[in-house]
Image (cartoon, grey):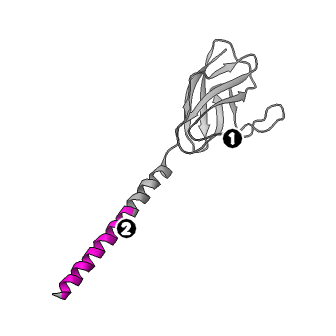
């Protein structure tokens, strides 16, 4: 009978070790899920083109847990502001980083004149290749 106690003890230890490894594995899987999160960007109401200063004001929200880099902003059919664009020989305008879980109003200097009351389509392109579209009014 002493062999049965040893067998029972060995089986018990094996079950406990397996349970510990299983719990650790499940915790690792759950923590890894956030690293595969796809960043989402929202262009909020209140975005507009100021015709007097020729500035596009974009109200952006990044609800994800990762920063988002904006590589280009386009007023469809009129102009593109990208990583090669400079304004009055100042610093390059792109990329623009939107921090995780934050709202930000981005001021984008424009080179063209826009007409008050006209609605324009705007596209925002991120470094990951995603594209977000909205409409804004010139005021």
Q: How many C-alpha atoms fall within 10 Å of the one at disc 1: few (<14), some, or many (≥20)?
A: some
Foreground mark, 1 or 2, reads 2
Farthest residue in the bottom direction? 2
Range shown magenta = 2-23
Against 131, residue 115 (above or below) is above
Against 74, residue 12 (above or below) is below
Secondary element type, mark 1: loop
The residue singled out by tag 2 in the image is: 21
Against 85, residue 112 (above or below) is above
Farthest residue in the right direction? 89
Q: Residue at x 35, y 64 (%)?
A: 22
Which dot marks residue 95? Answer: 1
Which dot marks residue 86? Answer: none
Q: Is residue 22 magenta?
A: yes
Percent position (x, y) of residue 99? 61, 40
Q: Residue at x 27, y 79 (%)?
A: 10
Q: Could you tell whether 122 is left or right of 12 in the image?
A: right
């Amino acid at each position: 009978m002493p062999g049965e106690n040893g067998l029972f003890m060995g089986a018990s230890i094996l079950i406990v070790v397996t349970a510990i490894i299983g719990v650790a594995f499940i915790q690792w899987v759950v923590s890894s899920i956030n690293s595969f999160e796809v960043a989402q960007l929202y262009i909020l109401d209140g975005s507009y083109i100021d015709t007097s200063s020729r500035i596009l004001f974009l109200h952006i929200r990044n609800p994800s847990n990762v920063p988002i880099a904006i590589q280009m902003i386009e007023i469809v059919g009129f102009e593109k502001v990208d990583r090669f664009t400079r304004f009055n020989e100042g610093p390059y305008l792109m990329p623009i980083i939107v921090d995780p879980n934050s709202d930000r109003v981005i001021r984008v200097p424009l080179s063209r004149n826009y007409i008050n009351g006209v609605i324009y389509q705007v596209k925002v392109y991120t470094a990951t290749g995603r594209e977000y579209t909205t409409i804004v009014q010139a005021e």
